[in-house]
């Protein structure tokens, strides 16, 4: 398959009806050619051990799909390296035999990033699951790819530190680095881009590099640097590269102090405009709000039904404030003044962990609540992001588009970052609806681009947004990206068919 | 206003993959992450909540073991306990230490500190004994509210909602009493950095079991520790008839 510039139709090709079947029938015998594979599989086994290699159909299918609507594209073989040395040895074998390499963390991505379009070898990194080098006073920790976000925060629970980037899923932290993940807390704590300090990456030819500073040994070192002007910013080159430039085998993350107190609140508004205007104003006053999530009336209705709640069915903001007791009072007072000035309702409050959990459950279950609106359907999440000043306009226009085209698309979003998701619920067997959804998402992405936004705020480009990336970046930037890709991976073995 | 003793046990962290020692004498603990037993965290949280509601005056965190357990006590202090007591037990005594010895220690401390409530986790995740609370109450001849999922203090009495097999049982017991915390009692708070720093200044008293008149001799000897047997591969059959034949052959039907 060639990956040269293609017209928009390529997006559609990935979204045709048959693609929504969770996994295509895989032929019983492997599609492996004799000779080549017979040498390679034993070589893999000598690196990872007998149990570290699998050709099983079910195992390969498991590693060929993520949580997106893209159909399952299983690799030819799955390997489980246990250390960076094993990853490097496996990469060298793949490099020698021209085999594609697909890194796999937790499979919780939303853009089809793990699909093995050209077959190849899936590097399942879950056995590399150590938390290393926690430096409490420097507020940093290094983790291997098998460590998930919740796993790390559980490990840190006695230290008073946490890693706040929260994309919802319990994703691998190195995977989050690879997709430059974000989440509900980004408005206060930033995304992965701001919080990844160093990476250890294995390139397509097996070389191991460290992007900001050399990890020397496993022994704890004092005073690792967080700020540096030395050389090109390689760390942020690999953050967001979605496995197309190398396999991330270790990441150092910036940690934060656990907030002394947290308060959550829910507020309903008479219109989308009022809710979004409130968001913009709250941020403009400099309130260091931790989470500010928007749910439209369709979404709230779905949540009410799914969780048996009784929130008023209207545009709603879910807010969370972090800080000391005193600063919370201030933050809340300022925010309440703003929301009331915009016609917002009184706040529904939650202070202690259990009540806050119940309050946020509605937001966290949004995906499932949307699916429950139409049982038997599948869901696809859009992911555009625009400058704050354009947010009211794009949400209002998008809702009009949804209504005009009779589409089910409840909206939930991290409005604090200008990022929102339409959860498009569609019947995979209704060709007409599938086409209408696809055209809607294209219009939405273009609408965002026209308002100086991006087609993907946090989910990544993956498989389905490559053409949109070209439109967004323009041909010259794409050429530079292609040049970097060719330099680091001349044989195009690293996760082919993604991003570019 | 009263004083509460809370027991906190240092155990291997719940997320760690346990490995049996090659000599089968126990599990590998060297270099392995340890933390406060999750049910003890819930017990600490409940005690701190009672203090915040001003129903009790002082919360004392107690742990028995070698020097490392002071880390666990410090975590309890960071969560809001006022002071700690480290009952030093090490070496063979520590390896053989079990609910009987701990309950004797707690009974002695309860009298010494004039406690009105002892709150413990319902069980530890390493031995799963679920005995210490019950034994402590028996030694003191105090009432017990075990598997508590809800605790309400009402004057000199405590109303406890207990999780039992059939559902929930509500009892009212008089203080002084022993309570053991079950999973749904509360959600423990995270220790924050400012509280961790404050905790460094709180006092941890040090004593030995002998100071409390407790004899640590164990009546239990661990003979051998083994991993659970590895799961055997299943057998696939082609047809339902084959399945029925096989089930008949091995006597299942």
Image (spheres, grey):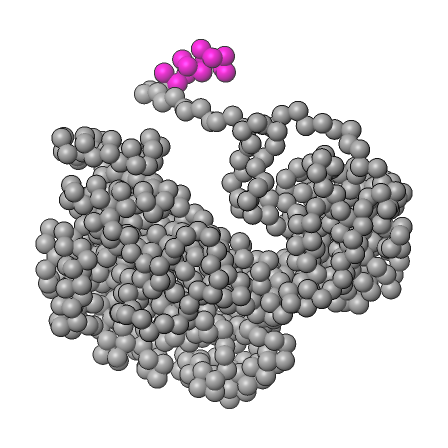
Q: Quadrant of the C terminus of chain A?
A: bottom left
Q: Is residue B243 magenta?
A: yes
Q: Locate residue A372, reporting x and y percent.
A: 42, 56
Which stretch is magenta?
A: B241-253
Q: Is residue A394 magenta?
A: no
* Residue B129: quarter of image: top right
Q: Locate residue A109, reporting x and y percent.
A: 34, 55
Residue at position x 43%, y 47% in the image = A129
**Residue A304 is at least partly visible in this image:** no
**Residue A454 is at least partly visible in this image:** yes
Q: Is residue B53 above or below residue A46?
A: below
Specify the farthest residue to the bottom. A341
* Residue A323: quarter of image: bottom right
Q: Is residue B174 left or right of residue A161?
A: right
Q: Locate residue B79, reporting x and y percent.
A: 67, 62
Q: Is residue A57 left or right of residue A3?
A: right
Q: Is residue A343 left or right of residue A206?
A: right
Q: Locate residue A434, reporting x and y percent.
A: 24, 58
Magenta region, mostly helix, strand or loop? helix
Residue at position x 46%, y 52% in the image = A219
């Amino acid at each position: 398959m060639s990956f040269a510039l293609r017209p928009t139709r390529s997006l559609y090709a990935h979204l045709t009806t048959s693609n929504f079947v969770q996994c295509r029938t895989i032929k019983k015998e492997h599609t492996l050619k004799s000779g080549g594979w017979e040498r390679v599989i034993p070589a893999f086994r000598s690196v990872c051990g007998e149990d570290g290699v699998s050709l099983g159909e079910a195992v390969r299918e498991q590693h060929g799909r993520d949580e997106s609507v893209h159909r399952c594209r299983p690799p030819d073989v799955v390997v489980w390296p246990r250390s960076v040395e094993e990853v490097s040895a496996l990469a060298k074998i793949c490099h020698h035999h021209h085999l594609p390499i697909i890194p796999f963390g937790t499979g919780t991505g939303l853009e089809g990033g793990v699909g093995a379009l050209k077959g190849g070898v899936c590097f399942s990194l879950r056995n590399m699951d150590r938390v290393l080098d926690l430096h409490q006073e420097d507020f940093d920790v290094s983790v291997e790819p098998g460590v998930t976000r919740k796993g790390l925060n559980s490990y840190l629970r006695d230290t008073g530190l946490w890693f706040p980037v929260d994309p919802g899923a319990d994703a691998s932290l190195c995977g989050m680095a690879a997709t430059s993940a974000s989440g509900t807390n980004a408005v206060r704590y930033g995304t992965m881009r701001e919080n990844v300090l160093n990476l250890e990456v294995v390139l397509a030819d097996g070389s191991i590099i460290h992007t900001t500073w050399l990890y020397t040994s496993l022994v704890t070192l004092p005073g690792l640097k967080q700020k540096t002007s030395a050389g090109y910013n390689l760390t942020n080159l690999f953050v967001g590269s979605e496995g197309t430039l190398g396999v991330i085998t270790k990441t150092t993350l910036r940690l934060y102090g656990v907030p002394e107190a947290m308060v959550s609140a829910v507020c309903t508004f008479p219109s989308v405009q009022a809710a979004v205007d409130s968001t913009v104003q709250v941020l403009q006053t400099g309130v260091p709000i931790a989470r500010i999530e928007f749910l439209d009336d369709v979404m709230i209705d779905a949540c009410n039904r799914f969780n048996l709640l009784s929130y008023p069915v209207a545009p709603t903001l879910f807010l969370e404030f972090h800080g000391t007791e005193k600063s919370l009072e201030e933050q809340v007072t300022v925010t309440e003044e703003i929301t009331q000035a915009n016609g917002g309702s009184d706040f529904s409050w939650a202070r202690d962990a259990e009540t806050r959990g119940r309050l946020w459950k509605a937001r966290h279950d949004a995906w499932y609540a949307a699916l429950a609106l139409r049982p038997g359907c599948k869901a696809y999440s859009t992911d555009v992001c625009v400058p704050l000043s354009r947010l009211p306009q794009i949400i209002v226009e998008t809702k009009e588009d949804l209504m005009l085209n009779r589409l089910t698309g409840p909206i939930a979003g991290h409005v604090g970052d200008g990022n929102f998701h339409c959860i498009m619920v569609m019947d995979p067997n209704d060709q007409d609806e599938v086409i209408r959804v696809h055209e809607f998402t294209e219009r939405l992405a273009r609408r965002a681009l026209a308002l100086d936004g991006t087609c993907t705020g946090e989910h990544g480009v993956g498989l389905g947004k490559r053409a949109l990336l070209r439109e967004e970046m323009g041909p010259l930037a794409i050429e530079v990206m292609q040049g970097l890709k060719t330099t680091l991976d001349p044989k195009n073995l690293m996760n082919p068919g993604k991003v570019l | 206003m009263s004083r509460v003793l809370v027991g906190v046990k240092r155990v291997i962290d719940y997320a760690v993959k346990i490995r049996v020692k090659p000599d089968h004498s126990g599990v590998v603990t060297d270099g392995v992450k340890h933390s406060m037993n999750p049910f003890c965290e819930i017990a600490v949280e409940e005690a701190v909540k009672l203090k915040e509601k001003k129903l009790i005056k002082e919360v004392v965190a107690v742990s028995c073991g070698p020097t490392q357990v002071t880390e666990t006590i410090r975590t309890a202090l960071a969560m809001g306990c006022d002071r700690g007591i480290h009952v030093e037990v090490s070496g063979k005594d520590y390896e053989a230490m079990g609910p009987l010895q701990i309950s004797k220690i707690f009974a002695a401390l309860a009298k010494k500190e004039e406690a009105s409530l002892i709150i413990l986790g319902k069980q530890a995740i390493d031995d799963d004994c679920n005995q210490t609370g019950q034994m402590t109450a028996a030694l003191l001849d105090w009432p017990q509210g075990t598997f508590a999922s809800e605790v309400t203090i009402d004057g000199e009495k405590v109303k406890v909602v207990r999780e039992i097999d059939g559902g929930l049982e509500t009892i009212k017991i008089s203080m002084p009493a022993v309570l053991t915390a079950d999973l749904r009692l509360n959600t423990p708070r995270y220790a924050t950095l400012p509280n961790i720093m404050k905790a460094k200044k709180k006092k941890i008293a040090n004593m030995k079991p002998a100071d409390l008149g407790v004899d640590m001799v164990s009546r239990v000897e661990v003979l051998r520790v083994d991993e659970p047997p590895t799961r055997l591969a299943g057998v696939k059959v082609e047809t339902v008839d084959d399945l029925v034949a096989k089930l008949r052959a091995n006597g299942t039907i």
